[in-house]
Image: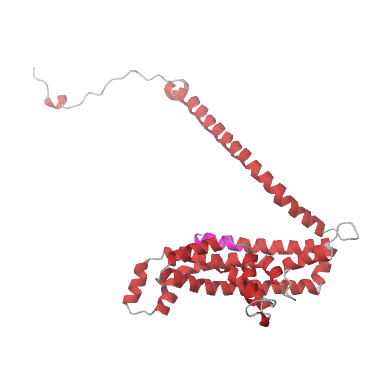
Amino acid sequence: MASDPALQAVPTLPQGPPTSSGPGGTPIALRNDCPRRERTRRERARRERTRRLARGLWTLPPVALLALFFLYPLALVVQQSLRPDTGGTSFQPYVDVFASEAFRHALWTTVWLALGSTAGCLVLGFLLALVIAFVPFPGAKAVARFVDVYLSFPSFLITLALLFIYGTTGIIGSFQFLTTPWGVLLAEVTYFTPFVMRPLLAAFSQLDTAQLEAASSLGARAPRIVRRVILPEALPALAAGGSLVLVLCLNEFGIVLFTGAKGVTTLPMLVYSKAILESDYPGACVVAVVNVLISVGLYGLYRVVSRRAGA
C-alpha cells in the first residue's frame, strides 16, 4: 500500500528526554543555575570592592603629602589671621586690615597692574604669534622653540635685563622709567607675553589653511582674514592664556621687588612689608588669605576656560 505524499512531507520532531520539573513546574536545570549566577554576581561585586579599596589606598600617600606640605601651612596662616596680638580668637585683624588705607591702595594697585599687564600680553602675544605662525621668515621654528625655553626663565632675570636699559645706570636710565608703576607694567608684559603666545601657537598650528586660502582667493585682505577667520579660532586660546597671565600677575612678587619701584605696593609686597618690616604677623596673614582667595577664584576661572578651549 503506497504511503500518502502529504504525510511524508510533514517533518518529524526529534524526541528528547523528558525534562524533569521540580515543585511549581520549574525545570531542575534552570533551578540549579540560579545559585551559580548569584555566586558569580557576588564574586564580581567583591572584586569591584577590592579594586576600589586598592585605589583608595594608593591615593592616601599623595593626599597625605598634600595635606602636610600645603594644607597644613595654609591652615596655620588662616589660624594666625584670627589671632590678634591681644590674644584669643577674633576677626579684629580682618577689620583692622580692611579699614587701612594701605590695604585698599595695595589691592587697587594689584588689580590694575594685573589687568593692564594681561591686556598688554594679549595684544602683544597675539601679534607676535601671528607673525611667527603665518609670516614666513628664516628661523621661525627656532623662534617658536625659544618661546618654550623662555617660559622657564625666572622673572628676576628679565627684570635685571631691563635694569640695564631703564635702570639708574642703564642706557636710558635718566628717565627713571623702571622705578615707576609703568616700568613694573612693562616688565610684567615682557615676561608674561610668552605665556599667551604658547597656546596661541598651538591653536594656529591646528588651523585649516584651506580656509585662509579660500578667503584670500575671494579677495579678502589680511586684516579681514585675521578678523573673520583667525581670531574666532584663537579666542579659546586667548581666553586660556589671558586667565593664566592674570593669575600670575596677581601673585607676582619678584618683578615688583627687583625694580625697586617706589610707591608700588601690591598685595604680595604688603605681606612682605607687614611680616618682615613691621612684624605684624596677623595682618600679614590676613592679606595672604585675601590674596589666596582671589588667586583660587581666578585659577578656577582659568581651569573652566582651559577646559572649554581644550587646553
Q: Is 76 positioned to the left or the right of 246 in the image?
A: right
Compared across the picture, whether 103 is left or right of 243 comes to right
- Quarter of image, res 209: bottom left
State the image quarter where residue 260 is shown. Answer: bottom right
Q: Residue furthest bottom?
A: 175
**Residue occupying the point 49% across, 74% down:** 127
| Residue 115 visible | no
Q: Is residue 45 above or below residue 301?
A: above
User: What residue lies at 63% left-to-right and 65% top-to-bottom?
Assistant: 157
Q: Main secondary structure of the magenta part?
A: helix
Q: Position of residue 289 (x, y in %)?
A: 74, 61
Query: Is residue 135 toward the left or the right of residue 103 in the image?
Result: left
From the image, which quarter does the N terminus lie in? top left
User: Residue drawn at (81%, 63%), measured in percent from left and top?
Assistant: 276
Q: Position of residue 135 (x, y in %)?
A: 41, 72
Query: Is 287 left, or right, of 35 in this rendering?
Result: right
- The location of residue 218, given as percent across then percent down, is 32, 77
Based on the picture, tell me whether residue 37 belongs to the magenta stretch: no
**Residue 164 showing in the rendered view:** yes
Query: Residue shown at 53%/29% (left/top)?
Result: 43
Above or below for 46 versus 128? above
- Judging depth in this view, the residue of 188 and 208 nearest the camera is 188
Please state which of residues 264 and 108 is positioned toward the viewer in this rendering.
264
Give the colour scheme of this rendering.
secondary structure
The magenta segment? 301-310
As drawn, which residue projects farthest toward the left?
A: 1
- How many numbered tags mark residues here? 0
Camera-side residue of 293 and 112: 112
Q: Of all residues shown, which one is farthest toward the right?
A: 86
Residue 11 rendering spot, x and y as whole percentages: 20, 26
Is 243 placed above or below 43 here? below
